[in-house]
């Protein structure tokens, strides 16, 4: 606890860059590491979700992520539900100058959401035989939720900059997360949250998982625009404590803690788990894949806000296929490829066999 | 408290960049946020003052700031009172090379202040039907105060690098702030101050508000030239404590605490309030407006000192109209536009409805 | 100890850059400093080993390091045992573009190790009359150890990113370091380790010395790729404590602590010893020598991993001969030349005569 | 106190950049500030000495510094005593490429010192009617001291990287500072020292002043080359405590504490005094004067060491005359001009009238 001055105190907060993992006295062969992760009825080969961002997730890339063993989440209020064929606008976005990019985003995303496309996109993914997940923001959840539920996804993700269980609004009926989640028959993942109390309240809504963080580490600017930020290592550690306390309070419900944002390099995945996360949702690393719809550009939902954009279109060099980025082999040394192999190696080198126990690994702060 | 060495200790101080705001367990619709701010008899739509700097405030832009709901303060010892028509020297300043800019400033500002222009400029603003405020430095207050008072502004701002209630000088009559403020019939805003004790003494002078900081965050160089600096988050927090203590001591006088300087991005406004400020005085953000007299350049009073300049003319890219900069809509994601909307959003996302209670929001330090 | 958040704590760790050496009340003439260092039966003129990296150590440069008074360690699973004549591939590596360098490394190092070359290279060094040392990674130790032992080196170095005394693997027979070291008749230096417990276990294997750190400070990327790092000053200090505790436990065995990695400038050598190291293993500084096989490029074993490279080929300007780099005279002021002279001078200026007592010098952290 | 690791602790140390001065509740007119400083029998107009570096001090510039009210110290083992006319070698140094500068320095400074020039240079300065001071390194003090003493300077400065009262050497007669100082009839200023104990021992030699720091902040590289550094704010504060304790021990001898090095901007002078210094010795700021012999280049004695250079020739832009740099007026805003005016202003703004009491000003650390 710091004294900022005579009338204000602040907890010290740590980002993933501030910390590092310390080896233990044991090492293991990589073949001993089990990365499987189970959330609700679905088991994945590794604890990595692809973020619902139009620059990385199309129905095709969501299918490919699922085929490789992870979970791709499609943005259900993005280009794939606003346009029958989003390829021309994706191309336009890739070609526009930096100076025009925010206004271009604002214009392109002003097209209305076509509810019938929600079902169509989800069906396309399900037909490929992989887990299906789609996301809406809290603001749009009530209007479009029926279409999402009707498409019977494995997961319904409700994702915003900062989501609370108690939204107060002058709107006729603000979304009551708790009753909403209890009504629908689809497991919900909800966030982002960034502190203990908000996380506790979100866990009490009945969500299967909570997202930690504000998402879009590489592309949002909440700190500059709003002054809001909770560095990720601290946010995860606080929410992991809420998971434990809620488990006690609920008599045993284990809510998955998913770090969402600030994961730019493969080493960040290991660090996020070391802080207490069960899984991570990644964005920017996948924007480096050659198949990414963004064509080497990356942006989040904050970037197209009509009156207060809080993110930019950013350039990320393409390094290889989605498969190489996720499961290797890697041909770079900067943590941009073989995310899964890097996590496996980090756990092997430090002597751990499963993700849950790796949450206890010793760390240092710099 | 740090031990610098065996014979010296120092409090740790924090800048606004060192801190960030943490969401609470509640979120709100932006329409629930009330940004109105009342100081003395004047109520503004939002707690933002435009700093008395010639690069941003002319009578015309002061009127525009007032029309939009804020308070523009005109520098009464700057170009608008030294020149009948300052446009030619503003153009000269905009065109001169960086290497010549300090000497050009020193020359242009060596023209004498024409007292009759003080009244004329204030009248021009009042005629537009917006609140009127003008500033002098403590050094010039005695000589020109009568002209300011005669123009009956809503606020008289006395602003310098570091202002104290107890100035000791060999001059015949050093300005006694307390008796001066009691004599005149105009509410006074005075500063900058940067610590608890100075703030207490300034509050005891009867001022309606105190400025915290040294002003001109982007353009001054007090740290390099003088070695003097109090990082802003700490300064605000200390002065906010003085406000509370003075309120008790005075039996209920509430002195407005106005952060002045180091506010470069919209997020800094929310952070300043989170540290305890009631309002902020901004400079550089307004220099980015297309109507700004500086034509994309920004400078403060420290920049034209005849023997010890402590600031430079700096370049700031123009991003949009004064209206877009203050109340949006924004087309950038760097916190340079829609300052008011960003503050409203920061408060809504963290669940607060009014500025006063937002001073209690939780923060973290990095 | 930091609270990262409610559920995780972390020790604060320091890099060599974070610390500096403080003079004492006494100064000495440089001629009073005795830098000799004895490990097992070998006495060196100064406590510096050259790292087993192909960019710096060939049989010729290992001989030159020995002639100058240090110990050159040859990589026995690198280019000199994979190629009869590695000069063409070294030239190819030096000529390839940065973008192709990782894939070129992966291809060049896919050539098989030729066991008969191990003996030949070691013989070549021994014939020059200098101490002989070669290294293998833990993974290759069992397969090729007999060839190393047969060549009767003065030291057998087992070096990997993170080496433990307890490797768990599905392989038929994971290497049991303790029984291996007891079997062979050559003193073993083993590492890297980075914390107290791992070091204690490594010391119990009977090793003559332990390497501290992950090696290859300039060329590896364990932090980005794996999230693993222990800043060097802290790692050395922790392992030095293990040395003391093991000495007590073992009834007097003194295991040499050798800092390996993060030594980029001559000042880092003095700092590593000030933290408790008995000697340092250097890489990058020697890559600056004109005789270095890397021809101005530097890379480590992590750089050629087939599926998860964790280091890059980096460019280092050549500054002078290997002799000038090690023992001077220097013609630069950046700590890149006369490593031995700089250590001698640092000890003289602070009043110390021998390396062992210099471990007690006072330091400050910034 | 930090735990670096299990076996090593370190005090936290602060540089001048880490701290800043806090205003008090009082302000003053600049005319109330008295900057006069008395050391031994000499009174200066302000507490600033010019460092004995060939890039800034020639007999002519030493005279000019004296004329302006300060004290110029001539390097008596530099170019002015090695060359009858050093202008050609100064020109050669100014013209040589960066890549050749260290070797050029090593060659030019290999010319022998001509003892008769010591007397001649000192006489030239005395004839101008200003205080006379010359410096030798401890290594050369015994050989050339008689020539310095014979020239009857006001001060004899013995200055090296780290100077102790107890130098141990195999040389026949290492310099015994205490008996040397008692023998000669000239007040001695000696340093650099950087901690409490060394300073206590130096004060006991009978010196009139001690230099704090290693000198040559802009031009030396002790940290990179030797690993040695004590950040300046901490060093001054520790030595100031030694001054107080020695004053008690000696029954009232006040030894002047002079900060030497790390003073690059005028604000650093105020900060050094705020940490406890009585005066500062400046180098780089004077190298910016048009009259500086270095012609815009700056270097220290460490730069020409024959086998281990620990400094480089660095480029500094010329900003104005020596008079403008020292006493103004200034035409820059970066703390490079009007050093004396800036100190006066810093004291006035914070309400102090004399240097001694300004040592008690409140500071913050960042």
Image (cartoon, coloured by chain):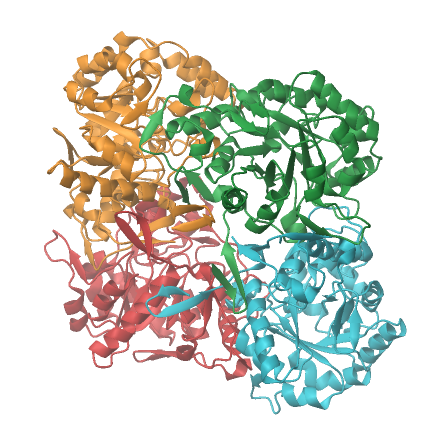
Chain colours: A cyan, B red, C green, D orange
- Vertical comparison of B278 with A298: above or below: below
Question: In the picture provided, is D206 more to the left or to the right than A75?
Answer: left
Task: Locate residue A14, reporting x and y percent.
Answer: 52, 61
Task: Locate residue D37, reporting x and y percent.
Answer: 16, 36
Q: Nearer the viewer, residue B9 or D327?
A: B9
Question: In the picture provided, is B13 more to the left or to the right than C98?
Answer: left
Question: How many marks on residues?
Answer: 0
Q: Residue at x 32, y 51 (%)?
A: B3
Residue C280 occupies which quadrant of the picture? top right
Q: Residue at x 36, y 9 (%)?
A: D112
Outermost residue, front side: C251
Q: Nearer the viewer, residue C313 or A1?
A: A1
Residue A157 occupies which quadrant of the picture? bottom right
Residue A9 occupies which quadrant of the picture? bottom left
Whether residue B180 is visible, yes or no, is yes
Q: Residue at x 19, y 31 (%)?
A: D204
- Vertical comparison of A38 with B87: above or below: below
């Amino acid at each position: 606890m710091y004294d900022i001055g005579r009338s204000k105190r602040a907890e010290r907060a740590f980002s993933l860059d501030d910390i590092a993992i310390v080896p233990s006295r044991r090492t293991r062969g990589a073949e001993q590491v089990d990365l499987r992760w189970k959330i609700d009825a679905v088991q994945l080969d590794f604890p990595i979700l692809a973020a619902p961002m139009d620059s990385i997730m199309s129905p095709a890339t969501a299918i490919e992520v699922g085929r490789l063993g992870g979970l791709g989440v499609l943005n259900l209020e993005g280009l794939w539900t606003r346009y029958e064929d989003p390829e021309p606008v994706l191309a336009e976005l890739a070609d526009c100058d930096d100076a025009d990019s925010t206004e271009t985003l604002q214009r392109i995303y002003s097209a209305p959401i076509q509810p019938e496309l929600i079902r169509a996109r989800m069906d396309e993914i399900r037909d490929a035989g992989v887990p299906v997940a789609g996301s809406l923001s809290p603001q749009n959840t009530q209007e479009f939720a029926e279409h999402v539920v009707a498409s019977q996804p494995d997961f319904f993700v409700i994702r915003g900059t900062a989501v609370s269980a108690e939204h107060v609004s002058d709107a006729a009926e603000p979304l009551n997360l708790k009753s909403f989640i209890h009504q629908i028959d689809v497991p919900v993942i909800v966030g982002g949250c960034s502190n203990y109390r908000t996380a506790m309240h979100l866990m009490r809504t009945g969500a299967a998982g909570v997202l930690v963080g504000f998402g879009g580490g590489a592309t949002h600017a909440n700190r500059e625009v709003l002054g809001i930020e909770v560095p990720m290592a601290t946010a995860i550690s606080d929410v992991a404590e809420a998971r434990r306390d809620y488990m006690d309070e609920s008599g045993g419900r284990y809510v998955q803690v998913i770090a969402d944002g600030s994961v730019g390099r493969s080493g960040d995945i290991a660090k996020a788990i070391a802080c207490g996360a069960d899984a991570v949702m990644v964005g920017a690393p996948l924007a480096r894949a050659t198949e990414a719809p963004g064509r080497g550009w990356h942006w989040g939902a904050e970037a197209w806000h009509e009156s207060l954009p809080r993110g930019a279109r950013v350039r990320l060099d393409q390094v290889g296929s989605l498969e190489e980025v996720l499961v290797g082999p890697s041909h770079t040394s900067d943590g941009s490829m073989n995310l899964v192999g890097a996590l496996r190696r980090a756990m092997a080198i430090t002597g751990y066999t499963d993700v849950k126990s790796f949450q206890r690994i010793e760390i240092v702060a710099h």
